[in-house]
């Protein structure tokens, strides 16, 4: 007997068999299978994105910026032996045919600054708007380091960034345990916006002291010395990278910086503080405890970290000291002055000059920025250190 269905039943059957629209798919699984670039491209086509869509776009653009940095470093072999420069200190593989030019460092940070601005754009207003959630399984995230479109285990986010995210707990973890799942929400929009400002401010600072000329002269000197005599293996792999990196850093600082970029950097660093205040205001109002990223005192992070009850106020006190320095309301203590004077950091952003490190150590280089006034104390940072035990630096990176 032929099966007879009503028009309504036919419609519902057809609907159940139809593929889900892109917006209804599991975002985390989409990144796992399609990658960051394709998922970002799809989100950018949404005509009427929800708050969740906007946060997802901002977050994945942020991760895509990290991926772009990895790809640049894979192609060029750029590295930071000092471990002090953001983005250049992340561990990753390098192409066997990697080759760099002196302009690659400035190019990398110019791209990073542009990418941070793009990541921040869809986040505007989310932290003070309606609640939303975006669930991401960290095991689904990966960076296409070699830009070949194929995922390999060494490209997983947790393999590349696990130690940075979890500190010593990364080495004590059960390798067979599943990676955490995070449910990002309204408060996290302010946290992410703060991080985009932090990295863009760092990029603008590096670009203000553009190292291209120093790198060019370092490469020329290295080639000239190698033409005289081949270097020792220890010189190539151990000594030279450190010596060259230190020389490039000192030489780049000892030039007239780009004042406009330093002013932009100062404003970004001040925005980090403002966004942190917005974050702690929003997160403090939360009453749930569901796969949190950065928790309040009543919550637990999905990463397994529980923050002391006074983390928010104590960290904001550290940032308040930073704000006072950035605005010139307090001074940085200087070793040749007592408590009644110090360095005006704000004027180093608004009226910059070359930084000759030897002159700054002796005092003649610092003199244009020395003045009478109240200096910032280490009390807030010591309170933060005491509260966090031996994890103060890790937590400061996480909290930004």
Image (cartoon, helix red, strand yellow):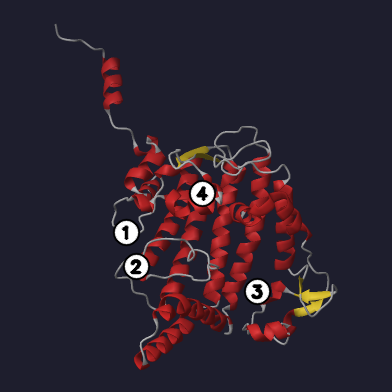
Q: Is residue 1 visible?
A: yes
Q: Residue at x 54, y 72 (%)?
A: 206
Q: Which quadrant, please, contains the C terminus? A: bottom right
**From the viewer's perspective, is the residue at label 2 or at label 3 nearer?**
2
* Nearer to the camera, 397 or 16: 397
Q: Is residue 363 left or right of residue 223?
A: right
**SS under mark 4:** helix
Q: Residue at x 81, y 78 (%)?
A: 337
Q: Quadrant of residue 298?
A: top right
- Name the residue beneath numbered marker 2: 75
Disc 4 versus disc 2: distance between alpha carbons?
30 Å
Q: Are marks 4 and 3 in contact (CB under 8 Å)?
A: no
Disc 4 versus disc 3: distance between alpha carbons?
40 Å
Q: Residue furthest bottom?
A: 228
- Name the residue beneath numbered marker 4: 171
- Name the residue beneath numbered marker 3: 349
- Name the residue beneath numbered marker 1: 147
Disc 3 versus disc 1: distance between alpha carbons?
37 Å
Classify 234 as above or below 130: below
Q: Position of residue 343 (x, y in %)?
A: 74, 75
Q: Residue furthest top?
A: 1
Sequence order check, earlier mark of 4 and 2: 2
Sequence order check, earlier mark of 1 and 2: 2
**SS under mark 1:** loop
């Amino acid at each position: 007997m032929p099966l007879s269905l009503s028009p309504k039943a036919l419609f519902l059957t057809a609907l159940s068999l139809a593929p889900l629209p892109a917006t209804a798919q599991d975002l985390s699984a989409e990144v796992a299978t399609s990658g960051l670039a394709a998922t970002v491209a799809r989100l950018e086509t949404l005509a009427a994105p929800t708050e969740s869509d906007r946060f997802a776009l901002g977050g994945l653009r942020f991760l895509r910026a990290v991926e772009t940095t990895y790809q640049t470093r894979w192609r060029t072999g750029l590295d930071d032996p000092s471990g002090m420069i953001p983005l250049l200190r992340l561990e990753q593989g390098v192409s066997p045919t990697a080759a760099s030019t002196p302009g690659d460092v400035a190019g990398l940070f110019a791209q990073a600054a542009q990418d941070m601005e793009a990541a921040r754009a869809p986040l505007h207003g989310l932290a003070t708007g309606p609640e939303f959630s975006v669930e991401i399984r960290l095991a689904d995230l990966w960076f296409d380091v070699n830009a070949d479109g194929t995922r390999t285990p060494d490209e997983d986010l947790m393999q590349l960034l696990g130690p940075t995210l979890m500190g010593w707990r990364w080495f004590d973890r059960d390798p067979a345990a599943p990676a955490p799942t995070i449910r990002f929400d309204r408060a996290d929009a302010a946290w992410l916006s703060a991080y985009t400002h932090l990295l863009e401010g760092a990029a603008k600072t590096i670009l203000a002291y553009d190292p291209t000329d120093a790198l060019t002269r370092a490469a020329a000197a290295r080639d000239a010395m190698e033409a005289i005599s081949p270097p020792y293996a220890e010189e190539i792999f151990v000594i030279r990278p450190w010596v060259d990196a230190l020389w490039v850093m000192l030489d780049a600082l000892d030039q007239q910086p780009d004042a406009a970029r330093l002013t932009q950097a100062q404003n970004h660093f001040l925005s980090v503080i403002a966004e942190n205040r917005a974050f702690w205001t929003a997160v403090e109002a939360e009453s749930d405890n569901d796969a949190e990223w950065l928790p309040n005192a009543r919550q637990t992070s999905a990463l397994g970290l529980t923050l002391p009850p006074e983390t928010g106020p104590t960290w904001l006190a550290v940032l308040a000291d930073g704000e006072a320095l950035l605005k010139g309301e307090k001074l940085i203590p200087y070793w040749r002055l007592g408590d009644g004077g110090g360095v005006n950091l704000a004027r180093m952003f608004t009226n910059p000059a070359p930084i000759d490190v030897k002159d700054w150590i002796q005092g003649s280089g610092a003199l244009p920025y020395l003045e009478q006034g109240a200096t910032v104390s280490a009390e807030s940072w010591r309170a933060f250190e005491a509260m966090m035990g031996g994890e103060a630096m890790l937590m400061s990176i996480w909290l930004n």
